[in-house]
Image (cartoon, rainbow, N blue to C red):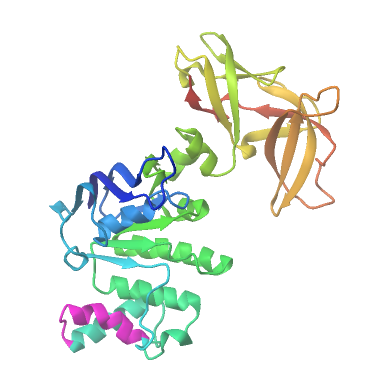
């Protein structure tokens, strides 16, 4: 439904430092295909290029290089109103002097749709976003969540092929935001419209997306499903940005037909599947998710087991985050640390506390090789 072909966007750097490139690359040769009916999220930190990519699709900006296609048609030079896309902005951008119904009907008026048909479609859109009976209210008489729904209804009423959403939930409080995430995903599934969603919130992206394009410095760092990015990150940046993880640079110390051996710190060895490491690699960067680390007070049997000391105990509601120290020095310093998660059963039932000596175990399949040298 949407295709970016080798799209770049460059701006003159406002105040380049000596030796710095005078051109700022907001997008740097980005290619992306978005399927019809897909919920795709452009995710990344501030300044990574995600909103610029959205503006390329909407027509609010044009690429310095490359082409933009919508439903097979090259729209690179077309203005926004000729692209059959609509956008929901972070600020909602409702007209304060118009009531809810008039705000929703505005796009239909621009399309010269007859009044009876406009009203019918406006009421239909209100029902779609569960705001029946509020068409006579002004935007300042609505809550933040209701204004967000009006902006959504106004975008959907024109029946676009693609709906673009630029951080539309960022102004909502945490509880309402969580509810709207589910409602928005359910609405997209019901309508079957292609949604392109921009956010810097990884949890938001994980909840709603069919696929995520994780962006960094104007490029797509990794494109894939939620499972792909969480369980199979391809770079240091992806592993560190998506969820919590432990990252360890390790030397490869041994190879057999059944496993690869690497060393964490000076004493502890981990065994990995030989299929996960290139035969010529000598160093690897490992990612180990905190929830994949098993802990108990007694020694554990099997591979990848080692002792540790619980240095910190951090309450996180249904789980406690534990900071584990490995290999204490003579001065009592722990140069190697590992974060883990354990279920929180309450103060009286919690079995692992700060200061405890524990044994950790990591299954070889839960160790992901992120980078190799």
Q: Nearest the camera: 297 or 244?
A: 244
How many labels, in total? 0
For residue 59, side relative to residue 173 (left or right) = left
Quarter of the image for residue 195 reads: bottom left
**Residue 325: image location, x then y, percent:** 76, 31
- Can residue 300 be seen? no
Picture residue at 27% right of the left edge, 45% below the top: 8
Q: Which residue is at a point 37% across and 40% down the rendered structure image?
A: 21
Q: Main secondary structure of the magenta part?
A: helix
Q: Is residue 153 above or below residue 223?
A: below
- Does residue 108 show up magenta in the picture? yes
Residue 222 at x, y = what percent?
A: 40, 39
Position of residue 46 relative to residue 256, above or below, is below
Of 175 and 63, the residue lying toward us = 63
Between 136 and 61, the one lying in front of the other is 61
In the image, farthest residue toward the bottom = 136
Residue for point 30% across, 71% down? 155
Left/right placement of residue 275 relative to residue 348 reads: left
Could you say where residue 338 lies in the image, as x and y percent from the top left? 69, 33
Tell me if residue 89 is in the magenta stretch.
Answer: no
- Is 352 on the left-hand or right-hand side of 302? right
Residue 94 seen in render: yes
Q: Specify start and end residues of the magenta stretch as a single range.
A: 100-114
**Residue 4 image point, x, y percent:** 24, 47
Image side of residue 158 versus residue 223, left or right:
left
Residue at image location 37% in from the left, 56% down from the top: 51
């Amino acid at each position: 439904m949407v295709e970016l072909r080798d799209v770049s966007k460059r701006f003159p750097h406002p105040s380049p430092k000596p030796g710095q490139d005078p051109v700022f690359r907001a997008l740097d040769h980005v290619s992306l295909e978005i399927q019809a009916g897909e919920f795709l999220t452009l995710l990344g930190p501030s300044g990574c290029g995600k909103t610029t990519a959205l503006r390329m699709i909407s027509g609010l900006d044009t690429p310095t290089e490359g082409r933009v296609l919508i439903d097979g048609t090259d729209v690179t030079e077309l203005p926004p109103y000729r692209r059959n896309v609509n956008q929901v902005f972070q600020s909602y951008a409702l007209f304060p002097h118009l009531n809810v119904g008039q705000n929703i009907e505005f796009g239909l008026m621009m399309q010269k749709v007859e009044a009876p048909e406009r009203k019918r479609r406006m009421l239909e859109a209100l029902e779609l976003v569960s705001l029946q009976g509020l068409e006579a209210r002004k935007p300042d008489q609505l809550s933040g969540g209701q204004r967000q729904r009006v902006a959504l209804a106004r975008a959907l009423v024109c029946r676009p092929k693609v709906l673009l959403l630029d951080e539309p939930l960022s102004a909502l409080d945490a509880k309402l935001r969580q509810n709207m995430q589910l409602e928005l995903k359910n609405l997209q599934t019901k309508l079957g419209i292609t949604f392109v969603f921009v956010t810097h919130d990884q949890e938001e992206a994980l909840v709603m997306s069919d696929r995520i394009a994780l962006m960094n410095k104007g490029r797509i760092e990794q494109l894939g499903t939620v499972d792909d990015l969480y369980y199979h990150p391809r770079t240091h940046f992806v592993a560190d940005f998506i969820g919590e993880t432990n990252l360890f640079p390790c030397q490869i110390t041994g190879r057999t037909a059944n496993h690869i051996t690497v060393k964490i710190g000076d004493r502890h060895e981990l065994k990995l599947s030989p299929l996960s490491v290139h035969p010529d690699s000598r160093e690897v960067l490992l990612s180990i998710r905190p929830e994949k680390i098993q802990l108990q007070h007694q020694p554990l049997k099997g591979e990848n087991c080692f002792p540790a000391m619980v240095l910190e105990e951090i309450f996180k509601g249904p789980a406690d985050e534990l900071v584990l120290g490995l290999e204490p020095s003579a001065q009592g310093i722990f140069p190697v640390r590992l974060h883990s998660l354990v279920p929180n059963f309450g103060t009286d039932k919690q079995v692992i506390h700060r200061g405890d000596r524990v044994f950790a175990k990591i299954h070889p399949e839960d160790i992901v090789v992120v980078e190799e040298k």
